[in-house]
Image (cartoon, rainbow, N blue to C red):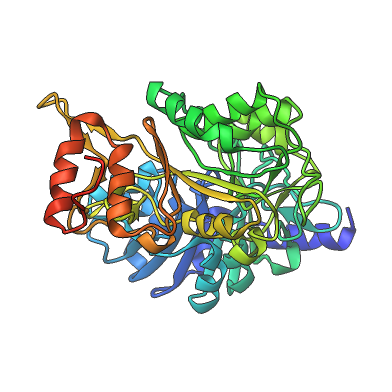
Amino acid sequence: MSNSYWNEYKGKLASADEAVKIIKSGDRVGYGECAYPTLELDKALAERKDELFGIYIMAGNVFHYCETVKADPSQEHFILNNISFSPWDRRMQEDGLDYLIPSVLHEYPDIYRDNPVDVAFVSVTPMNEKGYFNLSTQGVKVVGELKHAKRIIVEIHDKLPVAYGNDNWLHISRVDYIVEVENSRLPMCLPTAQADEIDIKIADNIVPVIEDGACLQLGVGGTPNQIGKIIAQSDVKDLGVHTELICDAYLELFAAGKVTNRKKNIDKGMTMCSFALGSQPLYDYIDHNPSVNIACPSYTNNPWIIMQNDKVMSICNCLNVDIIGQVSAESIGRKQVSGTGGLMDFHYAAYHSQGGKAILGLHSARLDKKTGKYVSNIVPAFVPGTVVTMPASLTSYITTEYGMVNLKGKSTWERAEALISIAHPDCQDELVQASKEANIWRKTNKR
């Protein structure tokens, strides 16, 4: 390592307590992301509670209950705001201590351009001989944040995977303080979601439309993992990957040699994503792997970039669909479950890709344990306060365990008929009645 870089490193080395002293009342502070929380800096900032007021924290999928939040339930000193929601964020929201910043993923960098943070916290790998830290697999939020941040504090974690990508390096000249963490942790690992019987049926309805040379975007959960498993054991070949998230759904595809990226029109030979989240084997696969590229979401999630590839298959999950095709994938009423993320980016782009398909998976119903009856996830109307993730005008394919329908180009009565055909049988009569009351059910309909 160059002596000049090493001397600069030593000059910027500080404890977490020392580093956070640069934060002053009223500052906007960017937190670490997803699998890489900056726990030491969060703890040190919480200890300054009595000195600071009005600290606006901008985070993204926090995977721990923040110490700053614990220290200040009154929110006079710290207020947590999130660009997306994790299970931990949902817990903090239920306590009235976490707030969503509504946004679509490809605009994340622009949000930080227009609302720059005064101080950014970020977990990084140890510095290399050229004076660069690696951002590992967390690029979705931090790339735009760091580009516009006024000051940067890094936490060093030597167990993080090194992930390649032009946007994924941070030079020491941009860093204000360096905090070395004792007992450096591995990235946050999520248990692999196991497909249930319904996930398996939904996957069975989707996989037949995936062709050789398709470019995949798989979401998180049992259905995408099952899709990966089925394809890995199939005759489908020469798949490409251009996705928001690399998750465990891809592991079997990589292992089976199904992903070559040879048929892509752009980024040939490269698996493109904006972040990774999953199991340790996933991080091990990405570590120092030149075939996996982490890029800023202004690239990975830009619909006009995505659609340049042919046969883009965007497969995501959602929570509810109403009878004209509006989609909610992030809230039930005011209860925030997730954020908009990249669902609309990829759904729109896949429809405009040559030979592409935009598909949303949905369990047709959920069982109410109190009544023993099924409650439809295809609904006459959303619960008041529910966030509409995607308008009906953009919705393409909807798939449940009872089949797949394409809503594009269909009128309201055709949409109602199509969606009811894949609704749970116990819920169909109620949906027919609701469609009649909404004047979108014709006498010549099938039911």
> Is 72 above or below relative to 108?
above
Q: How many marks?
A: 0
Residue shown at 62% from the left, 55% from the top:
139
Q: Percent position (x, y) of residue 375?
A: 19, 35
105 relative position to 340: left or right: right
Q: Percent position (x, y) of residue 378?
A: 27, 43
> Is 353 above or below relative to 195?
below
Q: Percent position (x, y) of residue 210?
A: 61, 37
66 relative position to 285: left or right: left
Q: Percent position (x, y) of residue 3?
A: 88, 58
Q: Residue furthest right?
A: 2
Q: Which quadrant: the C terminus? A: top left
* Foreground of the two, 429 or 174: 429
- The image quarter containing residue 265 is bottom right
* Foreground of the two, 187 or 410: 410
Residue shown at 66% from the left, 35% from the top:
283
Report if residue 391 is visible in the image: no
Q: Residue furthest front?
A: 444
* Foreground of the two, 51 or 211: 211
> Is 350 above or below relative to 148?
above
307 relative position to 343: left or right: right
Q: Residue furthest bottom?
A: 114
Report if residue 402 is visible in the image: yes
